[in-house]
Amino acid sequence: MSKSKLTVKQEKFTLNLFSGMNESKAYAGAGYAQNSPATISANACRLAKNVNVLARLEELREKAASAKIMNVIERREKLSEIAREKLYTKGTILRTGNLQAVEILNKMDKLYSDGAQVNIDNRSLTINVVSEHARKLTEQIVEGKGTELATTNH
């Protein structure tokens, strides 16, 4: 729903509701005529049930919710920051990083799967290998040396 389907006053009313005002205060704050409290309440209640107002409120709520949720890049950056933290006591490093953060990052990168994982798009090839044998085999393939390691027993 586009906010252009609302009048300026309806948009202000909707934004006031979204900010937490009650219907009557949102109505008055949007610049509607100040009648008796009963009339303001009735008009505000009717406006709050308007299909376009309800759709705009939902749109605002969705935007607010999505802005609070970390996307994949933000999660990876935060986990990487945690993993790199050094915990000090009296000038001595106790431990570097947080193993749980590293474990989560590894799971996000699917480094715990069996075999090699290949992602291909039109410009690049990414291969994540999970064993030394798979790494050596992948290097040989990339270098064009064949697959002699494939027959060894690992």
Image (spheres, grey):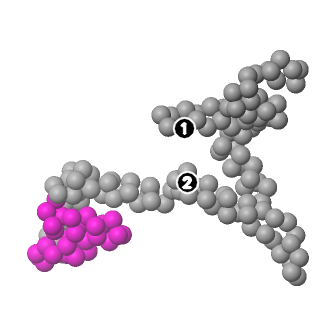
* Left or right: where 61 falls relative to 50: right
Residue matched to label 1: 124
Q: Position of residue 21 (x, y in %)?
A: 32, 71
Query: What's the residue at 47%, 34% (across, down)?
Result: 122
Residue 132 figure quarter:
top right
* Left or right: where 54 falls relative to 20: left
Q: Position of residue 14 (x, y in %)?
A: 25, 64
Amino acid type, mark 2: Ile
Alpha carbon of mark 1 to alpha carbon of mark 2: how far? 20 Å
Report helix, strand or loop for mark 1: loop
Is residue 48 visible in this depiction of the protein? Answer: yes
Image disc number at residue 73: 2
**Stretch of the chain drawn in magenta:** 6-35
Q: Foreground: 71 or 5?
A: 71
Q: Foreground: 55 or 98?
A: 98
- Alpha-carbon neighbours of circle 1 within 10 Å: few (<14), some, or many (≥20)? few
Q: Foreground: 38 or 129?
A: 129
> Residue 27 colored magenta?
yes
Position of 149 relative to 87 (above/below): above
Which sits earlier in the primary sequence, circle 1 or circle 2? 2
